[in-house]
Amino acid sequence: MNVSLKDVAERAGVSIKTVSNVVNNYRHVTPAMRERVQRAIDELGYRPNLTARHLRKGRTGILALAVPELGNPYFAELAGAVIDVAAEHEYTVLLDHTGGRREQEILVSQGFRARVIDGLILSPIELEPEDLLGRDHDAPLVLLGEREYDLPYDHIAIDNVAAARTAVRHLLDLGRSRIAFLGARTDRVNEPSQLRLRGWRTELTAAGVPAPDSLVAPTGGWDHADGAAAMARLLDSGALPDAVFAYNDLIAIGAMRVLSERGLRVPEDVAVVGFDDITEGRYGTVTLTTISPDKHTIARLAVQSVVERLRGGAEASEAASAREIRADFTLVERESTLGPV
């Protein structure tokens, strides 16, 4: 049975406009009237037609979220948070998987789904600033992730350098002095791994502790296998660390596997800190100390940014109004640095 606004109005004994005001959550409705209409809605089982509502506004009711790796637990958890927040604003989320490929990120950012979506939340890996300067699609764009951009779009990220320094300070406070960094990438200055490497180096230098290149282990990717391979190369080189700060949790977990295979105990011989606070790190034989970005806040800020741009119209999308928005992070201390607790 299709229940209309008219049906609800007749049941509640009010005008259709009053019902519409309640459904659209307008503020200027008395509590008594809101309760009266809501009772009628519940009794009749009325559900608003969100598609029609968005179409009346010239919108589709769909936001796109484009991430490099849906198989990466961090992005999967972030996507779930974005979907939940978008639902609160009556939006559906279309997920795009770019694979971290520049050509795919350009395709997504240039609006190849322009007729389908109202706004785009993009977490780029390879995209260069010049790729976005000529963007002619007017759907709001919000950038996520830790690459630094100087562009006329809202950018939401945590402070990677500060987060890395927090992780290294934790290890220093535990008396560790040969702290390796796993997951370096040397071809980009403002790429996230370089920002975290900068934080690693800055904190060690500030503490008067050596930060030799021999303790920096590059990786070709950022998965378990990459962490395992980097840890093995580091140990084989003879540069035995007493702690490891990894670019992300997947690398850290791969590294811990190799340490165990080599007969080294975590954290007694080598303490380990990761980054991302993925669920997997909480349930290993040794639980993982990690930097935890506030994924729910990142999701909320991203969706709110798009919605605000849509409500504000063209003037809200001007370059002068672009914002660099910082989300919080915390250090979550677990067994990989503290031992059994």
Image: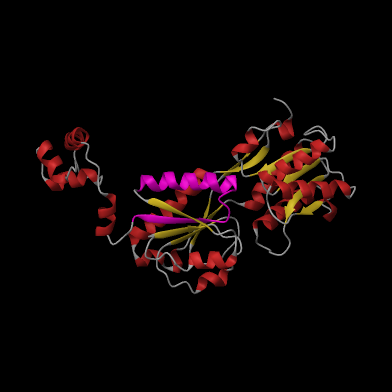
Q: Residue at the location (82% across, 47% down)?
A: 232
**Residue 43 location, x and y as percent?**
19, 32
Q: Residue at the location (36% across, 67% down)?
A: 315
Quadrant assignment for the N terminus: top left
Residue 95 lies, with reference to residue 290, above or below; the image says below
Relative side of 273 to 329, left or right: right
Relative side of 95 to 194, left or right: left
Residue 156 lies, with reference to residue 88, above or below; the image says below
Q: Nearer the viewer, residue 299 or 224?
A: 224
Res 85 → quadrant: top left
Q: Residue lying furthest front in this view?
A: 1
Please count the marks in the image. Answer: 0
Q: How is the image coloured?
A: secondary structure
Magenta span contains residue 149: no
Whether residue 20 can be seen here: yes
**Residue 132 location, x and y as percent?**
52, 70
Q: Residue lying furthest top in this view?
A: 341
Quadrant assignment for the C terminus: top right
Relative side of 169 to 278, left or right: right
Write the start and end of the magenta stretch as one range. Answer: 61-89
**Residue 149 location, x and y as percent?**
57, 64
Relative side of 270 to 197, left or right: right
Res 279 → quadrant: top right
**Residue 228 location, x and y as percent?**
76, 46
Whether residue 152 can be seen here: no
Q: Residue lying furthest right in this view?
A: 238
Q: Residue at the location (84% across, 49% down)?
A: 234
Q: Nearer the viewer, residue 259 or 15?
A: 259
